[in-house]
Image (cartoon, grey):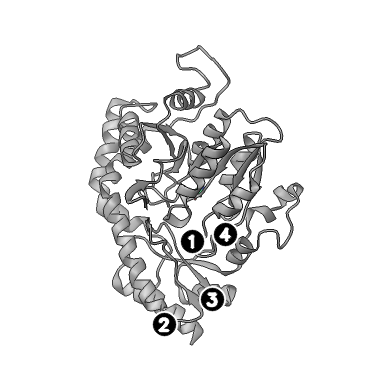
Amino acid sequence: MNVPMLDLVAQYATIKDDVLSGLMSVVETQQFIMGPAVPRLETEIARLSHAKHGIGCASGTDALLLPLNALNLKPGDEVITTPFTFFATAGTIHNAGGTPVFVDIQPDTFNIDPAAVKRAVTSRTRAIMPVHLYGQMADMLELMAIAQSRGVKIIEDAAQAIGARRKIDGEWRVAGELGWVTGYSFFPSKNLGAWGDGGMMVTSDDAAADRLKKLRLHGGAKQYHHDEVGTNSRLDTLQAAVLLAKLPHLAQWSAKRREHAAYYTKAFGEVPQVTAPVVDPANEHIFHQYTLRAERRDQLQEHLKKEGVGHAVYYPIPLHRQPCFAHLGYTDGSLPQAERAAREAISLPIYPELTRAQLDRVIDAVRGFYR
Ligand SMILES: *Cc1c(COP(=O)(O)O)cnc(C)c1O
């Protein structure tokens, strides 16, 4: 039995009628640009994020780029982030005119280390951009304390963490609630995935919301009046309709992912060569990825490939070691935890529709390699 890394066809079978009827209602009205499904989805995602405003945009990348653009970064302005993330996190900092400042991660959760953030703050720091990696939230309480004391903004990269939450001072706080602006991605493989590209920003700052709405529409709140230069980055109405049909399933899907993760983690407890993902006790993880640390990771990958078991390495090269950021001067050994994670991490299939037999197949394949 082959087990794919992700099986969107299996998900499609469970939601087909709802999604197709949502799409058809857009088709019937022919309102493809900013049709009613867009504000409806914006309201729903804002509510889910305990935020006042949702602002749809064309991708998760733009959901980070537009708030960075709203900071009006000047050459030399710094944004502190993690090197152990998808490229967009740092690429957008560069494209907004800022300098990414990479700091190391915590070895247990793979998330940005607040102590390292604190050491990296300078007079040029304008923002901190934590990533809630693999679906569990970064230490927002510590990060908020640093941001507030230094007067800098937090932009949450929640592309992998829609619906994730964290208990802070006895209260559940969700991804998107605490940062200045939060970016989500609806890339098809994300936990809430569209049928193409899409993204959304959420914020509770009224002025920021107005600004972001303008920036996604060529800098004008009113058509043909341009207060500043923005861009075209709208969320497609057809994609909003797909997402509205999928949204009622999201909580169950995340629960399924957690259930699969618990099953894997129990089994991998008996494989000393791998370390199961560590969930911070304050966090409720949504397991966008289930990521092990593994001895002889590259050989394990080869083995899983031969066995027909899906797997992926997120991320093989930390961003501070990417050629495009060589000019920033980081070297091998600059950020040892991120570099070690890049050598050891391997993600296994965790999508909700996996069967018990498929989970067992994955477990057996990993066990078989080390036996
Ligand atoms: C997917 C992702 C993005 C970018 O989203 P797109 O919709 O692909 O542009 C940004 N950051 C992280 C951490 C991601 O996983």
Mark 2 CB in 8 Å range of ligand 1?
no
Do the residues under discs 2 and 3 have CB atoms within 8 angstroms? no
**Residue tagged by mark 3?**
300
- Chain-order first, disc 2 or disc 3: 2
Amino acid type shown at disc 2: Glu
Q: Position of residue 267 (x, y in %)?
A: 37, 78
Instruction: Find residue 8 and report its image quarter.
Output: bottom left
Q: CA distance from mark 2 to mark 3?
A: 17 Å
Do the residues under discs 1 and 3 have CB atoms within 8 angstroms? no
Q: Residues within 10 Å of mark 3 (few under 14, many from 20)?
A: some
**Residue tagged by mark 2?**
270
Instruction: Find residue 68 and report its image quarter.
Output: top right
Q: CA distance from mark 4 to mark 2?
A: 26 Å
- Chain-order first, disc 4 or disc 1: 1
**Residue tagged by mark 4?**
315
Amino acid type shown at disc 1: Thr
Q: Is residue 37 above or below residue 107?
A: above
Residue at left 61%, top 39%? 93
Q: Name the outermost residue toward the top.
A: 225
Identify the element where label 4 is drawn: loop
- Chain-order first, disc 4 or disc 2: 2
Which image quarter holds the N terminus? bottom left
- Chain-order first, disc 1 or disc 3: 1
Q: Residues within 10 Å of mark 2 (few under 14, many from 20)?
A: few
Mark in the foreground, 2 or 1: 1
Q: CA distance from mark 4 to mark 3?
A: 16 Å
Identify the element where label 1 is drawn: loop
Amino acid type shown at disc 4: Tyr
Q: Is residue 137 above or below residue 33?
A: below
